[in-house]
Image (spheres, rainbow, N blue to C red):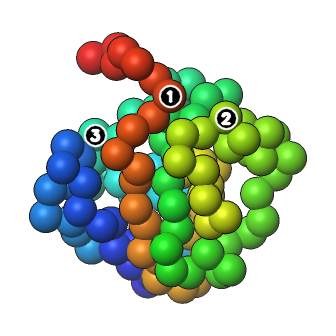
Amino acid sequence: MPKIVFLPHEHMLPEGGVFEAEPGETILEVALRNGMDVEHACEKSCACTTCHCVVREGFESMAESTEDEDDMLDKAWGLEPDSRLSCQARVAGEDLVVEFPRYTINHAREH
């Protein structure tokens, strides 16, 4: 079973963490299941960039992003070549190392 290493994030997971993932599960699903407070303002519908993450290792193992995801990613704060929307990026068979940027373009959280 693949694992996701989440790098430390001062608000979501200060110490970082390593969690098991099922192939086909999204990065966001794994994060939420393990208590990470990842913002996902559009409820996982690929309509915002609040769940933007950077896949530091294992990026090539995932399916390519869709055109819709790429269009949304163009609006993300801190976009990098290995950026994905965590609600769309599905775990394949390899371990991943994921980092959530410090900021999103959302200026106000709903909760």
What residue is shown with label 1?
A: 105
Give 9 or 42, whichever is nearer the viewer.
9
Residue depicted at x 46% and y 23%: 106
Tell me, yes or no, if residue 20 can be seen here.
no
Pointers 1 and 2 in contact (CB under 8 A)?
A: yes
Q: Residue furthest right?
A: 67
> Residue visible at 60% across and 51% down?
79
Mark 2 Cα-neighbour bin, 10 Å: few <14, some 14–19, many ≥20: few
Give the structural element (helix, strand or loop) at label 3.
loop
Secondary structure under badge 1?
A: loop
Tag 2: amino acid: Lys
Q: Which mark is residue 30?
A: none
Instruction: Residue 110: give x, y in percent of width and height.
Output: 35, 14
Marks 1 and 2, how far apart at CA: 8 Å
| Residue 67 on image: x %, y % | 86, 47
Residue at image mark 3: 37
* Residue that appears at 67% across and 34% down: 75
Q: Amino acid at mark 1?
A: Ile
Q: Is residue 79 visible?
A: yes
The image quadrant where one finds the N terminus is bottom left
Which residue corresponds to mark 2?
75
